[in-house]
Image: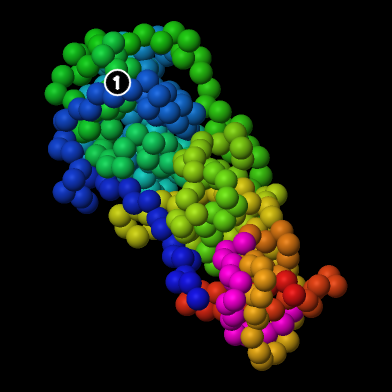
Amino acid sequence: MRTGLWVAALVVLLIGAASAAAPSRGTQMVIEDATQSEKIMDALENAVWIADGAEADKQVYVIFSTECAYCQQFFNDTRSKVAKVQLRWIAHCCNDSALAILESRSVDAIAHAYARKAQPVNDRARAARTLVVNQWAAKAVSDSLIYPMLIYRTAQGLVVNFGLPPDLDAMFAVVMKQSEQAQHQPASLVVLNQPLVLTPADNMKSYYNRSGKPLALYAQPDFAAQKVSLNIPADYGYQVIGFANDGWIVVKGLLMPDGSYVPAYIHAPTDIALSRLKFTVRPVRGVVVAQTRALEIRLHPDLNSPVVDRLEPGSQMDKTGEVILAGKTWAQVQVYTDGTKGYILR
């Protein structure tokens, strides 16, 4: 009997003083690796940002919170600076003001938030999905986040500035020109226009990759969305909270310091179909014996189900029941110490 692996594993985002490992305000990190830089910029460019200033050859991405006084100071300090660059504000956390900003995508909404003037949120569900996109984009930049976080290209590499910069004019002067990005529109806007239909997760409580091949984790249930992880290891579990659209599993993907979580999506239609199998377990006592060949143990009484273990020749296991499904007879055994059952085709 194997030890169970069905343990939810969340990626933790550390914000501000929540972690001693977080960098101090005003520090910078320069990323010279081209692959890493492109991954970060792809996530930011296609997050849902608010354009501040006219289309410009220079762009600075600003990850911010409406509850952050330093972000408010940065907003006020840049009102006379946006002729030099276009600021692209990425609302990251976490209240109705942030949702209103994401819904309207207007600089006025940011100003209203800092003036504590409540703005209505008409489509709360879509605004919440938009916030999820931005939270995963921020995770692509850094596991530690200090507001405001400024990201921009320079001749030396991609700069990530944590907290208020010491000299705005000096910062804007070194931002690299990217004229091809001046008219860019976030790809996530197209993804977010697609409907999101959620259904209960039925009997699936946890998920980890049993497919034997790499599986990606997405910020939305769409292949055009940001891939927040490219390879879910076989022993890395996620707590399942539902199913979405056509064949997507919704999991708890990103744990926030306040204990809330950001959802993520795994495309696994076969696993969903298997979790919905209807069958009756008949109480049967006895043992299953592997005589001349190993017997495969599957998570479901179906040949499409992943093989989680093998009963080697000369070994035996106690039966906990028997299932007859689609003309086949399966012996039920307890394969994990946490009570998870497995099935052996007889």
Is residue 68 rendered to the left or right of residue 285? left
> Percent position (x, y) of residue 228?
47, 41
Label 1 environment density (alpha carbons within 10 Å; few <14, some 14–19, many ≥20):
some
Please state which of residues 22 and 58 is positioned toward the viewer in this rendering. 22
Q: Quadrant of residue 332?
A: bottom right
Is residue 43 rendered to the left or right of residue 288? left
Q: Quadrant of residue 272?
A: bottom right
> Percent position (x, y) of residue 80?
27, 16
In percent of the image, x 29 and y 24: which residue is there? 31
In percent of the image, x 22 and y 33: which residue is there? 162
Mark 1 falls on what kind of element? loop
Is residue 261 rendered to the left or right of residue 334? left
Name the residue that disc number 1 marks: 32
Compared to 11, does 319 lie above or below? below
Q: Quadrant of residue 326?
A: bottom right
> Percent position (x, y) of residue 327?
85, 73
Q: Quadrant of the C terminus?
A: bottom right
In percent of the image, x 26 and y 38: which residue is there? 147
> Percent position (x, y) of residue 119?
44, 43
Is residue 263 rendered to the left or right of residue 170? right
Q: Which residues are magenta?
A: 307-323
In percent of the image, x 42 and y 48: which residue is there? 96
Q: Is residue 100 visible?
A: no
Compared to 236, does 170 lie above or below? above
Q: Amino acid at mark 1?
A: Glu
